[in-house]
Image: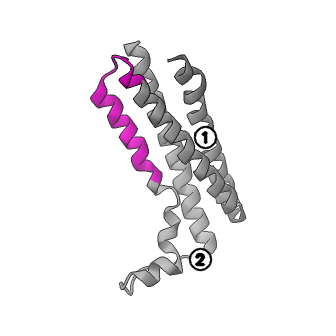
Amino acid sequence: MDVYTGVVYPLVLAASGVLALAGIVTLLWPRAHRVLRVAVAATYAAVTIHLITVAVLLVSGNSAGLVLTLGYLVASLALLPLLGIGRLGTPEAAAADPDPDRPVLAPDQIARVDAAAAVIIAAALAVLAWRVLTILEAAA
């Protein structure tokens, strides 16, 4: 449990903070979209480490509520595909869809959509990690 509270939980919070900051910067300056993509990759890694650590804690005998804890973990995994949602507005994605009314976004619009999603998802991931922490601490 010490590894989780001392390393993994702060890692998830830091990744969420960096993701939110990169999203805000990208909203203000769309050319920072490359930095946001790096922050998204780091967030994927942090959430993966979080998932593995909590799974090990649950298997190793922590008496936390299994259904509730797994629900929060699944919710945090379900948020990850929304990072980079602007890709649905690229010309390649529009060409793959036969719908003639499908919008095609300009590169700066794609960056802003990704940035707004990143800020929202960063907040949600931080809250989900906090809930898992409170569940694990209550069971310890």
Q: Position of residue 25 (x, y in %)?
A: 69, 54
Q: Position of residue 41 (x, y in %)?
A: 59, 51
CB within 8 Å, label 1 to label 2 = no
- Please tell me whether mark 1 sits on a helix, a strand or a loop: helix
Q: Closer to the N terminus: mark 1 or mark 2? A: 1
Instruction: Residue at 54% x, 76% y: name it.
Output: 105
Q: In the rendered view of the protein, which quadrant contains the C terminus?
A: top left
Instruction: Residue at 49% x, 73% y: name it.
Output: 89
Using the rendered image of the protein, determine whether residue 123 is visible from the camera's viewpoint.
yes
Front residue of this view, candidates 130 and 53: 53
Q: What amino acid type should be assigned to the residue bearing mark 1?
A: Ala
Q: Which residue lies under the disc numbered 2?
A: 106
Is residue 69 rendered magenta in the image?
yes
Front residue of this view, candidates 119 and 39: 39
Q: What amino acid type should be assigned to the residue bearing mark 2?
A: Ala
Q: Position of residue 6 (x, y in %)?
A: 59, 21
Is residue 132 rendered magenta in the image?
no
Q: Which mark is residue 15?
A: 1
Q: Is residue 118 above or below residue 54?
A: below
Q: Is residue 73 above or below residue 35?
A: above
Mark 2 is surrounded, within 10 Å at the Cα level, by few (under 14), some (14 to 19) or many (20 or more) other residues, namely: few
- Please tell me whether mark 2 sits on a helix, a strand or a loop: loop
